[in-house]
Image: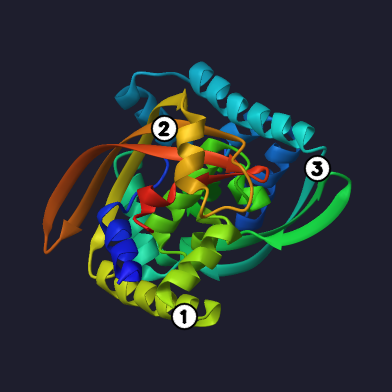
């Protein structure tokens, strides 16, 4: 059954995009941390992002990665500049509201402490970590839309101040726009789905044209397809919950323009109503480490993904998801 092949693919490729870290002086509350991060993206101010992590974290990170504050500040500013350029291209702007604050679940807290363990001397306690949802409004081509992000922010208290989980710092427009406006953000959406088994994000990996084709091939209604896939995702989550968190790293090594656009168009012509607009081949290097039954298991892999632009958005080639 194709849905189980999809899920097998996802399980074998559980990973996420690597996230640049920052550091700084901390904030008086978890809400202040979330608002500072969102404010940095409104003002395109990298120095605000630099204040989201403990100085102790950054000092250790600099030593291990042989880098310095100036280089990190430049990297973070590049992220913000890319976001600013996207807003300009879309003739858009964003505003944000923090919503849905909750305490971290125990497995999420274990994951956070494992990720921070090499950089901080003390663990974060259960009462000192929370997760947020963020509602954002954005203007695109002069028309306002509203959406709720599927991603989350995690804030934690350390030595009396509040900071942001490094992996909560957005690297792609997906966090804000919820759509795939660049090849990198299309890949980030796929990696987020693989990592979190997020059924909401899975739908955006392919265009509606392609989903309609899948329903016909499976011989089921749209509602039945998504209900069965959601049930399968839940079963896989139960299995992953038996792991004592994993460390995942994914790095884009190279992006090349797809030279033979005609050949790709031929492959997709039966799946799409119109022609594709562009395509790239992305080389990705990944490392997946999980702790299972008390032992660390590490897997390295390199893959190439074909990402194509259709109707103004970027999507993953269905063959890369084993969809057909």
Q: Tell me if mark 3 has few (under 14), some (14-19) or many (20+) residues whose alpha carbon lies within 10 angstroms of its own.
A: some
The residue closer to the viewer here, 35 or 176, is 176
**Name of the residue lying farthest toward the right:** 142
Residue 219 visible somewhere in the drawing: yes
Q: Mark 2: which secondary structure?
A: strand
Q: Check disc 1 and report the residue beneath it.
A: 220
Q: x and y percent of residue 71 in the render?
A: 50, 18
Under circle 3, the secondary element is strand
Which one is earlier in the sequence, the residue at label 1 or at label 2? 1
Alpha-carbon neighbours of circle 2 within 10 Å: few (<14), some, or many (≥20)?
many
User: What whole-number distance in Å separates the C-alpha atoms at marks 3 and 1?
Assistant: 40 Å
Would residue 20 be visible to someone looking at this image? Answer: no
Q: Which mark is residue 282?
A: 2
Disc sitting over residue 318 in the figure: none
Q: Is residue 46 left or right of residue 307?
A: right
Viewport quadrant of the N terminus: bottom left
Q: Cβ–Cβ below 8 Å for labels 3 and 1?
A: no
Image depth: mark 3 or mark 1 in front: 1
Q: Earlier in the sequence, mark 3 or mark 1?
A: 3
Q: Which residue is mark 3?
A: 93
Counting from the top left corner in percent of width and height, residue 183 is at: 53, 37
Q: In terms of secondary structure, where does tag 1 sit?
A: loop
Of residues 300 and 312, which is closer to you in this image? 312
């Amino acid at each position: 059954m194709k849905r189980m092949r999809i899920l097998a693919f996802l399980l074998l490729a559980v990973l996420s995009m690597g996230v640049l870290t920052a550091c700084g002086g901390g904030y008086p509350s978890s809400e202040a941390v979330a608002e500072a991060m969102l404010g940095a993206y409104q003002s395109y101010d990298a120095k605000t992002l630099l204040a989201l992590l403990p100085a102790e974290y950054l000092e250790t990170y600099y030593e291990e990665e042989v880098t310095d504050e100036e280089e990190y500040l430049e990297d973070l500013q590049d992220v913000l500049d890319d976001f600013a350029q996207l807003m300009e291209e879309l003739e858009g702007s964003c505003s944000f509201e923090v919503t849905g604050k909750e305490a971290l679940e125990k497995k999420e807290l274990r994951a956070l402490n494992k990720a921070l363990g090499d950089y901080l001397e003390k663990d974060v306690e259960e009462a000192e970590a929370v997760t947020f949802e963020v509602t954002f409004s954005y203007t695109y081509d002069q028309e306002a839309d509203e959406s709720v992000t599927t991603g989350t922010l995690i804030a934690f208290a350390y030595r009396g101040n509040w900071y942001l989980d490094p992996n909560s710092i957005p690297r792609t427009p997906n966090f804000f726009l919820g759509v795939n406006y660049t090849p990198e953000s299309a890949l980030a959406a796929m990696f987020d789905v693989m990592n979190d088994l997020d059924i909401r994000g899975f739908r955006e990996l392919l265009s509606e044209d392609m989903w309609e084709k899948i329903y016909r091939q499976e011989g089921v209604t749209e509602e039945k397809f998504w209900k069965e896939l959601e049930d399968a995702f839940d079963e896989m989550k139960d299995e992953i919950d038996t792991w004592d968190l994993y460390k995942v790293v994914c790095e884009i090594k190279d992006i090349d323009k797809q030279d033979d656009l005609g050949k790709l168009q031929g492959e997709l012509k039966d799946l799409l109503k119109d022609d594709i607009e562009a395509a790239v081949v992305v080389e990705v290097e990944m490392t997946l480490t999980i702790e299972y039954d008390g032992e660390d298991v590490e897997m390295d892999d390199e893959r190439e993904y074909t990402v194509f632009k259709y109707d103004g958005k970027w999507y993953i080639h269905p063959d890369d998801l084993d969809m057909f």
